Image: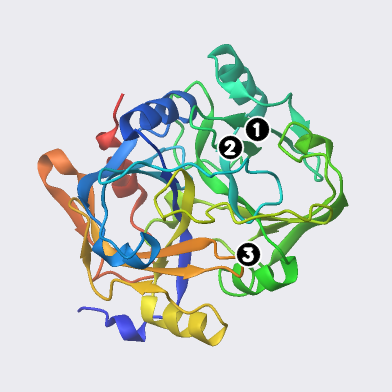
Amino acid sequence: MRIKEHTMEKIICGIQQMGIGVPNVEEAWSWYRKFFGVDVKIFEEAAEAPLMTMYTGDKVQSRTATLALSMEGGGGFEIWQFTSRNTEKPTFDVQLGDFGLYVCRIKSKDVKASFEYMKSNGANVLCDLKTTPRGEPHFFVQDPNGNIFNVVLEKETFQHTKFSGKTGGVAGAMIGVSNIEASMKLYADVLGYSTVEYDETGTFDCFSELPAGNKKVRRVLLSHPQLRKGPFAPLLGPTKIELIQSLERTDCRKIFENRYWGDWGYIHLCFDIQGMDALKKECAEKGFPFTIDSGDTFDMGEAGGRFSYIEDPDGTWIEFVETHKVPVMKKLGWYINLKNRKPDKSLPRWMLKAMGMNRVK
């Protein structure tokens, strides 16, 4: 029996992916495979983006996009490249405290081993091993396009792979905001990151190698108190959001100021959800109305679903995707239709593991 969408409650299943605008998808993904082990291709599609024109200069732009995951678990990367125009960089040097998606958190089951792997293989590691306010090891690394990643400890693993770097996928994000209390109304109240793991103010040694990392900030790390539910929740795993508010800089700017969605850098943080109508109602009631809503199944070639966007109080793009169809083994034409499944129930682990057959070496 088909479950009617409008009867569903809102379910935040986890971070599906971090959208990353790049000048060359293949070069970027090759680097992410080598250094993060994000090597399972879920879809690859070249098409126009007609629903995004309010964020692309009121003009339909063409692009190519690849969604890739790690079977170690964590969110994936949607690696995104304009094909109708150049991918534009910011016109200023992005610094700690600027508003938007500043750093992508990457999970590691052994941070020291990940650090040594990346150093020995020539990655641009920005600092020595540091510790968080909770005493956990972490470090920052920069990809060839200038995107900064924070490799953090997360021992929960979906599947142990042979990847030497010991990392998995996306474990959350560090987001620059102008007012933490205002931002908590979205990230804690709507998205469920309601546990405050720490709330610290000062200058921090672990930020010392970042641009403006010597300035005073307030940093709040948020986690979700309950395990996520939904079809892909075991694979996507737990994630955390760190909000950064500059208390010293007076020149903070929006990272995507005067640029298009899809341009160079972290373009959106995407959540896998169930119950889009219920979520739409709640977001509107809490002051975060949908700015874009595909309204029905949107075909992504090898995958499909309904997607929508909201903005946080500083204009950072948050995407929601309610997945309707996803490939498990494309070579055999095996796809999962999720519309007829109980929305809070996860897919069997063997089925999720079968997605690893789409690995690209």
Using the image, tell me which numbered label, if any, was put on residue 140. 1
Which residue shows up at 68% across the image and 43% down it? 95
User: Would you say 182 lies left or right of 41 here?
Assistant: right
Label 1 sits on a secondary structure element that is strand
Q: Is residue 125 above or below residue 300?
A: above
Which residue shows up at 53% across the image and 77% down it? 288
Identify the image quadrant of the N terminus.
Answer: bottom left
Give the residue at the far top of this rendering. Answer: 120
Which residue shows up at 40% across the image and 28% down it? 33
Residue indicated by mark 2: 149
Q: From the image, state whether disc 3 or disc 1 is nearer to you.
A: 1
Q: Is residue 29 above or below residue 322?
A: above
Quick check: can you spot residue 325? no
Q: Residues within 10 Å of mark 1 (few under 14, many from 20)?
A: many
- Pick whichever, 221 or 26, lies toward us: 26
Q: Position of residue 232 (x, y in %)?
A: 39, 56
Q: Position of residue 180 (x, y in %)?
A: 73, 65
Q: Residue 67: which quarter of the image? A: top left
Amino acid carrying label 2: it is Phe
Q: From the image, state whether disc 2 or disc 3 is nearer to you.
A: 2
Label 2 sits on a secondary structure element that is strand
Q: How is the image coloured?
A: rainbow
Amino acid carrying label 1: it is Phe
Q: Contact (CB < 8 A) between labels 3 and 1? A: no
Amino acid carrying label 3: it is Tyr
Q: Residue 260: which quarter of the image? A: bottom left
Residue indicated by mark 3: 193
Q: Earlier in the sequence, mark 3 or mark 1?
A: 1
